[in-house]
Image (cartoon, helix red, strand yellow):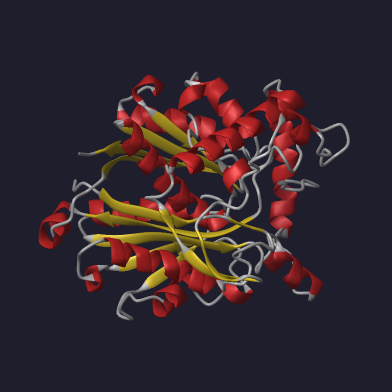
Amino acid sequence: MAEAYIVDAVRTAGGRRGGRLAGVHPVDLGAATLDAIADRNDFDAAAIEDVITGCVMQGGEQSGDVGRNSVLASKLPDSIPSVSIDRQCGSSQQSIQFAAQGIMSGTQDMVLAHGIESMTRVPMGSTFKLFKDAGLGINKSERLEQAYPGVQFSQFMGAEMLVKKHGFNRDDLDAFALESHQKAISATESGAFENEIVAVKVETPEGDEMHKVDEGIRFDASMESIGGVKVLQEGGAITAANASQICDGSSAVLVCSEQALKDHGLTPRAKIVNLTVTAGDPVIMLEEPLFATDRALKRAGMNIGDIDLYEVNEAFAPVPLAWLKHTGADRSKINVHGGAIALGHPLGASGTKLMATLLNAMENRGSKFGLQTMCEGGGQANVTIIERLN
């Protein structure tokens, strides 16, 4: 089987809801990272055979194949096709895996995995709510109701279930949230994000500026400030401060075959070692990364000690905490530059975003193997294992 290589990975700095990226149309936001891949790498962009774009809220400004629209708005040739996919929060991690599968199958040589989500302009849940309010139905069918009678599939409820099942408390979650901000602050101040962030021009009251610092980082975060945020439900432990931030962003990863590397004189930064996707309990929903990681490591012939760095999406603090507890992984190796609690979780863009951060962190530290995983709606999870090269 052919090998799949990562040549480059980029992301925009996150924008808070209603923040610095709020004035940027999601199509243009998506085009920014496509342009960056073309600008940063010396090759004929017409050789890209597909752009696979993750996006969760595919309505309004993100409708009509938002990935294709981003290609048309970018400097890439119009001859490059694109498809937009939705595996909930794992959408653009699945984009990476679909891109790699195209390479490994021998049917393609150069594919861009891509992700877009403007949670300001196309709010979370808006596609469901607008159709429901218009009397056009909901996504829970009669047969699904029979299978799960009276069940409300809710990530917030799943997060609380995870807290109770794994024996965490509010202080555990808040302490992890504080660590996320502290690591993100350190990464920002040390310049660790400079190679992965694509600057985006934004309008401000003071004039046009380049957005290149993650807007969600709380540089004054403390246990007191995090602990002062109200819980989302009475008797619960989940708060807005120990959950991922609503975020606007875009990201992209260039995946190539060995033949494409030779043809275009490209140097790979990493090789993809394993691609895994699994599904489990759709009610607790957020626990599946634990079991997906088990399967991925087994298929790769590895154990958790072989992995140097991990990116486990911080949808809610109990997810990476439960993952650490289950796998026995070293806490000092997880989300070393901070995670979605500090940096934001732009839904469909998070998979390729995390890969950009993981790859750069591995290069900064001289790490060999990295693992990325995230929880996804419906009780699903993707795991991608990479090996750093050079």
Residue found at the very far front of the displayed protein = 206
Q: Residue at x 15, y 52 (%)?
A: 258
Above or below, comparing residue 218 to residue 57 in the picture: above
47 displayed left or right of 184: left
User: Residue 255, position in %: x, y?
Assistant: 29, 55
Q: Is residue 138 above or below residue 77?
A: above
Q: In the current view of this chain or complex, which residue is farthest to the right? A: 234
Residue drawn at 62 percent across, 72 percent down:
23
Residue 318 in view, yes or no: no
Q: Quadrant of residue 113?
A: bottom left
Where is residue 166 drawn, in percent x and y?
67, 23
Which one is in front, 217 or 238?
A: 217
Residue 263 is left or right of residue 42, and the answer is left
Q: Total number of numbered labels? A: 0
Up-down relation of residue 113 to residue 283 (above or below): below
* Quadrant of image for the C terminus: top left
Where is 381 relative to 91, above or below?
A: above
Q: Position of residue 216 (x, y in %)?
A: 63, 49
Name the side, left or right, on which 38 lies relative to 354: left
In the image, 143 versus 255, the foreground residue is: 255
Closest to the observer, 385 or 208: 208
Which quadrant of the figure has residue 302? top left
Q: Is residue 201 visible?
A: yes
Q: Position of residue 63 (x, y in %)?
A: 56, 74
Q: Quadrant of residue 70?
A: bottom left
Which residue: 57% across, 46% down?
Answer: 343
